[in-house]
Structures are given as C-alpha cells and as structure tokens.
Image (cartoon, grey):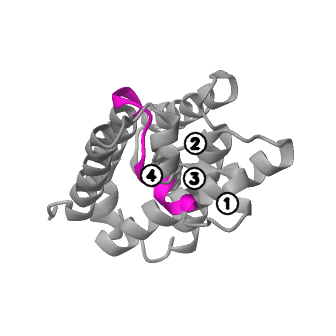
Amino acid sequence: MKKTPCATYILLAANLIVFFASELLGGSEDYATMLRLGAASAPLIKEGEYWRLFTSMFLHFGFMHLANNMIVLFALGENLENVLGPVRYALLYLLGGLAGNLLAFAHDLLIGRTGISAGASGAVFALLGCYVFLLLKNRRNMPRMVVGRVIFGAALALLPGFYTPGVDAFAHLGGVAFGLLFAFALKRSIQP
C-alpha cells in the first residue's frame, strides 16, 4: 500500500520556502544575495565555510531553475520514498546533494573556478541514480523498452551540464554516482 510521501513534500516545501525567502531578501538571481544566503563558492568553502555545501542545495537561481528541480523531485519522489521509506529517502536526497556539491567543489578547486553555484541538482540526480539502479535490478519484471528509455533519459539529463553555461555537470555526476552507490549498498533490503 502506498503511503503519503511526507519526506518528498517536506523537501519540496523547504525548497519553495527558501526560494521565496531569497526573492524577498534581494532576489534569487542576485549573486550577492545568493552568496549571503549560502550559495557555494569554492574559495569560501576552502576558507572553512563548509556549511555552504549543504545550504546551497536549497537555493535556486530563478524560478525556472527551481521548477526544473522540483518537477523531477516530485516525479521521482513518491515511488522512491515508498520503496526506501522516508528516512532512507531523505538521507539519499541530502547526502546525494552533499556528494554532488563535494565533487563540484573539488572540480572548482582543480580548475580555479571562483564563481558561485546553487541548486538541488545533485540531490535530484542522486534520486535519479537510485531509480535507475532499482530499475536495472528489477529489469526482468519490466518491459525492455521501459528500461532502455529511462536509462536513455537519465543519460540525456546529464548531457546539458557539459555544454550549458551555468550548469554544473560535476554536481550532477556526483549525485548520480552517490544514488547508484546508495542503492547498491541497500540492494538486499530494497524491495520495489
């Protein structure tokens, strides 16, 4: 029996509240405001502001950025939360976002990037990675076409990060990798 996806709704609400607060406090597309509110910045994180790896997960640059992430969170959330349970699901989201931000931070340090970043993409891609793993684990019970389409869609979702300015492919990759590893670690206890 499916339960109400409370953790998904809480995460959606948290992202929406932070977005509207950022709009009121100076604008979600104003870099100074976003930096003040906790956007990720490799130089500042390197100086010890590690909390930005977490807070940046809930900030979004403009409504479309928020909408894109929240649509995917909503689309994947109900099924994944019912499979994982609310606690493991919330951990997947939060730790996946952190993993994505850590990989993006490491990449920024490596190339000397000093810009700022924000968004729930790493967390959302962790959900996608877990979803793909579960689909592959149960591919015998699924039509081959469905499995192929989901994997193709996941690959397509990763591509824009490599050629679209302002999209951090490394946050996406870190999130997907964490989602796959998380699902693999729990594979015996997850029964979709």
Q: In the image, what residue occupies the spot 60% across and 26% down? A: 160
Q: Earlier in the sequence, mark 2 or mark 4?
A: 4
Q: Which residues are magenta?
A: 52-65
Q: Earlier in the sequence, mark 1 or mark 4?
A: 4
Q: How many marks?
A: 4
- For marks 2 and 1, give the CA distance: 12 Å
Q: Mark 4, mark 3: which one is toward the viewer? A: 4
Label 1 neighbour load within 10 Å: few <14, some 14-19, many 20+: some
Mark 3 vs 1: CB contact within 8 A: no
Q: Note whether residue 127 is visible.
A: no
Residue 171 location (% of width, % of height): 61, 47
- For marks 4 and 3, give the CA distance: 22 Å
- For marks 3 and 2, give the CA distance: 15 Å
**Amino acid identity at mark 1:** Ile
Q: Which numbered tag is attached to residue 175?
A: 3
Residue 25 location (% of width, % of height): 32, 43
The residue to which callout 2 is attached is 117
The residue to which callout 4 is attached is 37
- For marks 3 and 1, give the CA distance: 19 Å
Find residue 99 and report its image quarter: bottom right
Q: In the image, what residue occupies the spot 21% across and 60% down? A: 5
For the N terminus, which image quadrant? bottom left
Secondary structure type for disc 4: helix
